[in-house]
Image (cartoon, grey):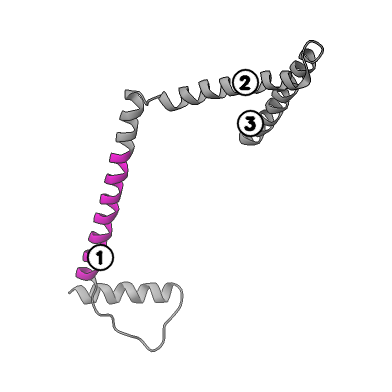
Amino acid sequence: MRAAYGAGAAAFGIGVFVLLHVVAYHAMVPQLSPLVASIILLAFDLVVAAVLGYLALSNKPDTIEDEAKMIRQQAVVEMRRSVTAMALVGEVAGAVIRRPREVTVVKPRGTVRLAGELAARLLARR
């Protein structure tokens, strides 16, 4: 919902900006020709765009942003290592613990099956 409200606010903000240009244009037309008024507004917009673009390009991340990026990268590396290690341990443990199972012709259901499997495992360990 916050994103929808933000998008709506941005749309109306752009509308206000456009209407401000129209008002400025109509205010300049009685003193200047329409072409000159348009060129003045265009030059103003280009100057503002150039200043904001320069600020955006020259804004370098500070030490806190750099440290946060390094911490995030380290966390991702450690997460990948732990997932890989756990998968490897799981496979090795499964290969070591697995024993051949006897196949029964009739498989009982419910608690009878559970009791039979538990008994078979207990007897197989001895």
| Residue 51 painted magenta | no
**Could you say which is closer to the camera, residue 101 or residue 27?**
27
The label number, if any, that marks residue 115 in the structure image = none
Q: Secondary structure at mark 2?
A: helix
Residue 77 location in percent, x, y?
28, 45
| Quadrant that contains the C terminus | bottom left
107 on left or right of 83: right
First in residue order: circle 3 vs circle 2: 3
x%, y% of residue 64?
A: 34, 24
- Give me the C-alpha separation between circle 1 and circle 3: 48 Å
Residue at 25% across, 50% down: 81
Q: Which residues are magenta?
A: 73-97
Classify residue 19 as left or right of residue 79.
right
Task: Give the alpha-carbon distance from disc 3 to disc 2, as whole Å.
Answer: 29 Å
Comparing 53 with 80, the one in front is 53
Sooner in the amino-acid sequence: mark 2 or mark 1: 2
- Label 2 crowd bin: few (<14), some (14–19), many (20+), radius 10 Å: few
Tell me where residue 93 sits by quadrant: bottom left
**Most common secondary structure along the magenta stretch:** helix
Q: Is residue 50 left or right of residue 112?
A: right
Instruction: Name the residue that disc number 3 marks.
Output: 6
Label 3: state its secondary structure. helix
Residue 46 lies, with reference to residue 82, above or below; the image says: above
Q: Nearer the viewer, mark 1 or mark 3?
A: 3
Residue labelled with disc 2: 43
The circle on residue 91 is 1
Kindly report which numbered mark, 3 or 2, lies closer to the viewer in this rendering. 2
Q: Position of residue 72 (x, y in %)?
A: 33, 37
